[in-house]
Image (cartoon, coloured by chain):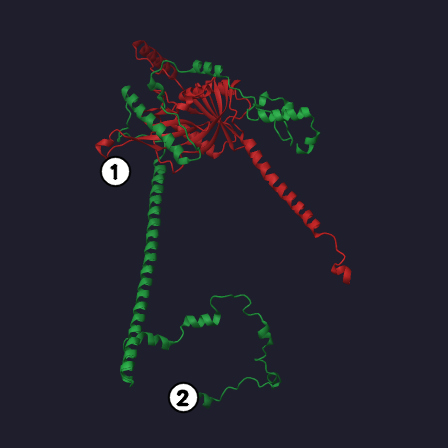
Chain colours: A red, B green
Amino acid sequence: MASVYKSAKAGEKAENKSNGTVDRRINKQRVLLLSSRGITYRHRHLMNDLEAILPQAKKDSKLDSKSHLHILNELAELSNCNNCIFFEVRKRQDLYMWISKTPNGPSAKLHIQNIHTMDELKLTGNSLKGSRHMLSFDKNFDASPHYQLLKEMFTQVYGVPKGARRSKPFIDHILSFSIVDNRIWFRNYQIVEKNPSNTPGYTAKDQDDITLVEIGPRFCMTVIRVFEGSFGGSTVFENPEFVSPNMIRAAHRREKATKYNSRQAAQTERKAKLKEAEGKESELSTRKVFG
Amino acid sequence: MSSDDSNHSEEELQIIQEDELMEQVPVSLEDLDASDIDDEDGDLILEQKVTINNEAALKRITEEFRLKDLPWIETMAVTSTEPIELEDVHDDLKRELAFYQQALEAANIGREKVKAAGLPFTRPDDYFAEMVKSDEHMEKIRQRLLDETAGVKASEDAKRQRDLKKFGKKVQIEKLQERQKKKSEDMEKIKMLKRKRKGAEDFSTEDFDIELDGGADDKSNKKSKRGPSKRDKKDSKYGFGGKKRYAKSNTAESSADVGGFNPKKNKAPFKGQAKRPGKAKRANNRNRK
């Protein structure tokens, strides 16, 4: 029965197409969203937030391997996705975000820091689930080629295409990407248009005013590498300023270790100095005279 | 370096001088020979990361996968007119303000473009659908905001109350001082009066004096009669102010002083406790009271 229905439906669709009521989607983007194993709760919440924001995203189960990332291309193809956001978690603390245009690339690996998820009570905004958002880019994105590439990638991966499945008609929030300190800062704001009900002391002058209220999540991305292919291929950009969190932790630990060593050295030195200062017994010492 | 300066040949010295001249001109690490680098401590890291920035390839790739010939409404991406430049990244307020302004500008531009494309922008108030944050969560947020404002108000109230108390105390002290002043002035007046009287008539007017004491000088007299207060007594007994250390330890004087010692007392026979008086005596005593 079902197959009959399906074929009938397909025929109908084809007919529609010939009638001129074609599928008008010209920007087809679907995003596969998944993480590696060993993800922590905070990273998981961030992933859930992204899923809530992006109606065109499809969440998949955790990926076992961290070394064979090329299978992600196949996974994306299986779920009809042409983009992929992959959360790679290392040592249960460091989060790397891969974003990729599967299957042919390019792709980029970013280090994610300063995560604030939507659950935080300080972020007071709210928006429709699945409403399309605008994307706001800093002008700094046009300054260098790798940022231009990333900007294009963000527009395709984070932008909700018109007519996307589950998307809702109104536009009530905006994602902003800014470059400060050679990092990309991500923010999500609700767009509130002033009206008598939400603004005390509303006047006609306020009519077209917009205020923004932050919804969250917020995080900060540092570019590590940009690859020509999807999850692989030759490196076309490598960030010279990036220092891996492992290095930072090791340096910190080494500093701590040297602190102990230097203190010990100082103590032994002081002891030796004191001993020297005591000096030799003189001819007239009490012990010699009366002893 | 300084220790083996004397061993340098002239040639080497010349090189050193040249080096000093060249110090002003920065030389990149790649341009240096390994022999040029003076590594006294041996902790210099000579390896440098080879950075890749293949701009031509980046541009080519971007051009390849760029979405071409799409109307704006498909992507809704807005680029700001001014790049963000911050002096201090760690200044949270300024940084967030810059982000906010960037997004606000984009929102204003975007709204015009969306309206121009003939799509609805504003969500009507009666459009109900699932939100990103649940109602429970929004209720929590609301509660937190309320708590915050209540906390601010409470702390302000407490501050006001403290200030009032401080002010009240000041007023009280002023009043006391005024009273004291008035009293001393009165006393002065009375003394003057007395002296005048004594000068005018030699015979004493005792009854008048008594009258005076009972009249204006009443309060101060009472106080002087009362003697030291409980506080004064306690202070003299337990001490107030001054050094507290060694108060109970012997001094040369105290150890030389044998005033309290009576050798006879030691030899006196033991008397035992004072006997309890008999019943009749006790009853008598009680009656006397």
Residue A196 coordinates in the image, percent (x, y):
23, 34
The residue nearer to you, when weighing A277 against A164, is A277
Residue B286 coordinates in the image, percent (x, y):
42, 86
For the C terminus of chain A, give its image quadrant: bottom right
For the N terminus of chain A, give its image quadrant: top left
The residue nearer to you, when weighing A20 against B253, is B253
Q: Residues under labels 2 and 1: Cα distance?
A: 87 Å
Is residue B202 visible in the rendered image? The answer is yes
Q: In the rendered picture of this protein, how many numbered marks are placed on residues?
A: 2
The local crowd at label 1, few if under 14, some if 14 to 19, many if 20 or more residues have their Cα within 10 Å, is few
The residue nearer to you, when weighing B37 against A65, is B37
At label 2, which amino acid type do we have?
A: Arg
Q: Is residue A4 above or below residue B145?
A: above
Left or right: residue B64 versus residue B111 is right
Quarter of the image where one finds residue B272: bottom right
Left or right: residue A40 versus residue A288 is left
Q: Would you name the residue on which mark 2 appears?
A: B288
Which chain contains the residue that carries disc 2?
Answer: B
Which residue is the extreme one toward the left?
A204
Q: Residue at x 39, y 30 (%)?
A: A187
Is residue A60 visible in the rendered image? The answer is no
Q: Residue at x 33, y 76 (%)?
A: B221
Q: Would you name the residue on which mark 1 appears?
A: A200
**Between marks 2 and 1 in the image, the one whose residue lies nearer the viewer:** 1
At label 1, which amino acid type do we have?
A: Pro
Secondary structure of residue under mark 1: loop
Left or right: residue B285 versus residue B130 is right
